[in-house]
Image (cartoon, rainbow, N blue to C red):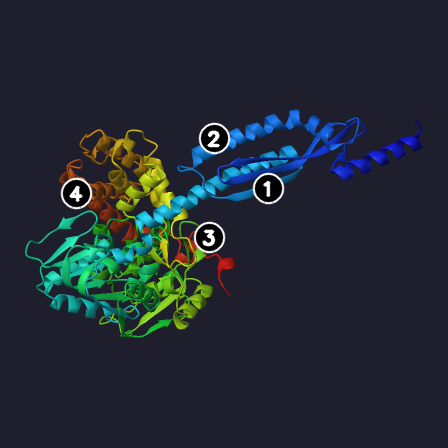
Amino acid sequence: MNESSEASERARKKKLAAQLGWKLAGHDSVEVRTERSLILGARTIIVRGRVNVPTPAEFVQELGEALVAPLVEPAFAKLRHTLERAANKILRTPDDVAGKHVFEQASFFSALENAQRGMIRIFEELENRRIDEQVEADLGLRFYLENFTSQQRSFQYFVGPTNSGKTYAALEELRAAESGIYLAPLRLLALEVAERLKELGVPTSLITGEERLIDPHARHVSSTVEMVDTSREVEVAVIDEAQMLEDEQRGWAWTLAMAGVRANKVILCGSEDGFFAAQRLAERLNVKIEMRRFERKNPLTVVDAITLENLRSGDAVVAFSRSAVIELQQQIRRSGRSTAAIYGSLSPAVRRREAERFRSGEATILVATDAIGLGLNLPIRRMVFATVEKFDGTLTRPLTPPEIRQIAGRAGRYGLHEAGEVTALDPRAVRLLRRSLEQYAPARPDLPIWISPTDDHLQRLAEIIKTNHISRLLHFFQTRVLHEKNSDLRICDLSGTIEVAVALEVSDVFMRLPLPVRSTYARAPVPVRGLSLAVLTRWGEQHATAQPVLGDELLNDLRGRDRLMVFEDRSRLATLYLWLAQRFPEIYSNANAIMTMREESDEAIQSALSRQGTNHPQERRSVAQPNSILRRGKGPPKFQRRRLPR
């Protein structure tokens, strides 16, 4: 056959193939279009595509199908078997959803693969939807707020900047009440208020995560907000730093306090930013909230940037990490001034002593992290920002205007200073400070109300999704619960708790503990870096085997190059031990010895901070002045200009 005849024959076959929906694949093969369907429950699954087979003697449908069948039928039977197994494995109850699903590709076998993946995804989505509906029905998280007290209450929001007297006015109402509770963001602040009420002749108990100092005659309690007792009735409740309602990590505790505290009158003290969150929450609780506005009692002004050598007595320098605070403290000391230091890893006792050194004038300069922004009463004349950026656990970002206002407002303590001043070590930072303090923008009205699942929620969810791993349960809450756009409730950030739970649940021994006990361990105040998590796991394993946890790791001599950090770690572990002892006193039975050890560690920390914060005259001549230190790049954390908003 010559070339012309071959071309003519191929054209004829191509035309015949096209009429059947086939396609010529080569000189001796053809792609035959085929379709298969199966019934699975109430669903019809159709798979379409072409199969490559030898060219039949005649281009008729029956011959093509006869060639296709031996290739297709086994593969299609395997698909049926796979989908039936997947449905039985994924779905806890039979699939009763009617539907028609068509999977079509150029290749029939590619369409088969798509059908398998697609139907498994459909089964997973169906089961997830069923679980979500069951979670919605059984856990009732949409009605989380309505599950608390139905007691008739009145809400008042005392709004105003720092140094406006709003907390003083609230505490005066608390003092005059027959019974009451004060809820603080920090243990140190709860302690200060308890002592203040006692000085005014009001017996007051102190309850924090790690201690309970109960006065049998007291009808008032000063407590950290996470320890709120929602079963006790009081006349007045004061919830401080109410703008924390908008905090994704801890906001759930303020939500719980506001929704659950059983008080005739609830007074919230906070900034302007927090009022909108409190108003949204009050609306959900069907309680009217009244605002009482307070104005700052003395002016707060932004002044030109300074250098470290221009610091004066009564100044506070704020940075945002322990290392930055220590470095700044050393530089200031070398220039001839004494300093006190406050940062997050210090125990409350040491923070209090350092604050007292600054109050008494023993230390003329305070160097601190933003921990001083939450209610600590300090005689700060001028607030100096070493930087206006902070690492928030994910990225380094500029401070928000509410954060700047909260910290800056601590300058100019009323009654001690006629005015407060705010500045920075960098002129560009001063411009940002001025904008943040002078230009107020209200918070968005659609921000969420943060809540956190309780142990009861975890227990009920464990029965629904058939797992007893705390990490998986918390991950479910974080990723699957209350994510609809029309829900004003949101689950708070559980990432830290999940990370702790994952580390603990690696241990098979730890997994023997009941779910509520493991949940408590996962919520323990433990850093996820360093040795603390390993120590917590070891204690959990001892607990699981019913052994008493004595905390021997803390009583042994600890060695390290940085003695201050060693004692900070020991104090932090002691605090963790005491926190667990509050919850499991039979297991953590060595609390008295650990308390004594923590006091000794705190003494060592205080001594070290005092030494490095006190100038030694013999050192002055050999040390460069602060400006030259800054020029050599050894100053406070570098101000990253590119991130500053213009």
Q: Earlier in the sequence, mark 4 or mark 1?
A: 1
Query: Of the numbered discs in the image, which one, if any, rests on residue 595?
Result: 4
Dot 4 crowding, Cα within 10 Å, few <14, some 14–19, many 20+: some
- Where is residue 162? Give x, y as percent: 29, 68
Q: Nearer the viewer, residue 262 or 103?
A: 103
Q: How many marks?
A: 4
**Looking at the image, is mark 2 or mark 3 earlier in the sequence?**
2
Residue 283 position within the rendered picture, expressed as x and y whole percent measured from the top left: 31, 66
**Do the CB atoms of the residues marked 2 and 4 lie less than 8 Å apart?**
no
Residue 552 against residue 498 in the figure, above or below: above
Using the image, tell me which numbered label, if any, was put on residue 85.
Answer: 2
Q: Position of residue 596 (x, y in %)?
A: 15, 42
Name the residue tied to disc 3. Answer: 632
Assess disc 2: are there few (<14), some (14-19) or many (≥20) residues with their C-alpha within 10 Å of its C-alpha.
Answer: few
User: Quadrant of the image for the N terminus?
Assistant: top right
Q: Earlier in the sequence, mark 2 or mark 4?
A: 2
Measured in 3D between alpha carbons, the distance from the residue under mark 2 to the one under mark 4, in whole angstroms, is 58 Å
